[in-house]
Image (cartoon, rainbow, N blue to C red):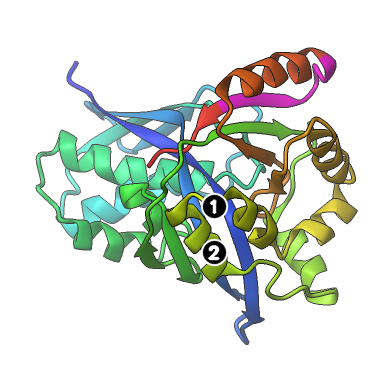
Amino acid sequence: MYKAAEKSYAKINIALNVTKTREDGYHELDMVMVPLKLHDSVQISELKGKKDNFVVMDDFSIKFGHKNIAEVALNAVLDKVNIHDKKFLVFIHKNIPVQAGMGGGSSNAAATMLATNTFLKLNLTKEDFLEMAKPIGSDVPFFVESKPARCKGRGEELSPITIKNNYYVLIVKPEEGCSTKDVYEKFDLKPNYNAANIDNVIKALETGDDDLLEKSMGNSLQDVACELVPEIKSIVDMLKSKGLKMVMMTGSGSAVFALSQDKKYMKKLFKEIENQYPNYYVELTEVLK
């Protein structure tokens, strides 16, 4: 059976500022997001003789809501090209943890659109994908290309950035995840605007100035997420105690990352932390430039 497949990359936020809360309840953001080599895999194939599309994942801890975001993405493509006489199976092999702030669901949605385009030989453009991505979810436009970018608005206003250094990324996530809804509701009670100096973060990444990057990175949501899941702060403190300096929670949590150019040391720490904290999700990957 013919299938089309796409890599569905994870991301981290090296900076995340909530700049204001809008009247519709959404939040204006200013972020620096970078993709990681860590990825899920999305496959699509046609289902003969079926009345519905199906999205299947091999991570049974994920609870589907009324409609999985990957199915919404699939339908967006099919509606755009007016194909309603065929049904499809989307299979997602999961590596990216859920409720981690690493964009797994949004990435799966973007990869589903790209795989559908390949499978049906539609020749849709980047602009077509961005147009479809915006109403699906805030981070979905970023994953259309999965390249380092400054992301503003709800995440849909993208400006590409360059990264000079090669960074290894140690991800440590506690068992408990963070509900994005809960984190933002708590943030609204105790807002922390402009936690990061975005301009300096971009300058540091482009020039390779790790000292400036350490001083400039920040996440408006980290303090309130730590109140909801105290283990986040424990992980940040633990990673810093190991001598790592560029350490922060990504997105709305609960995953924490550390950046370093020292591959040998990061490999050593990965094994050490994996053994010391068997209940945590621990992964070593790289920034995808």
Q: Residue at x 32, y 51 (%)?
A: 144
Please say whether residue 53 is visible from this viewpoint: yes
Q: Nearer the viewer, residue 246 or 175?
A: 246
| Alpha carbon distance from label 2 to label 1 | 19 Å
Q: In the image, is residue 168 above or below residue 213?
A: above
Residue type at mark 2 is Met
- Kindly identify which numbered label has been placed on residue 31: 2
Circle 1 sits on which residue? 209
Against 8, residue 226 (above or below) is: below
* Residue 120 occupies quadrant: top left
C-beta proximity under 8 Å, tags 2 and 1: no
* Residue 138 seen anywhere in this rendered image of the structure: no
List x then y, in percent, for residue 127.
Answer: 21, 63
Quarter of the image for the N terminus: give it: top left
Is residue 281 part of the magenta span, yes or no?
yes
* In the displayed structure image, the side of residue 247 where residue 72 appears, left or right: left
* Vertical position of residue 91 compared to residue 111: above or below: above
User: Residue 189, percent across and down?
Assistant: 84, 75
Q: Position of residue 172 (x, y in %)?
A: 71, 32
- In the image, the segment drawn in magenta is 276-284
Q: Which mark is residue 269?
A: none
| 144, above or below 91, in the image | below
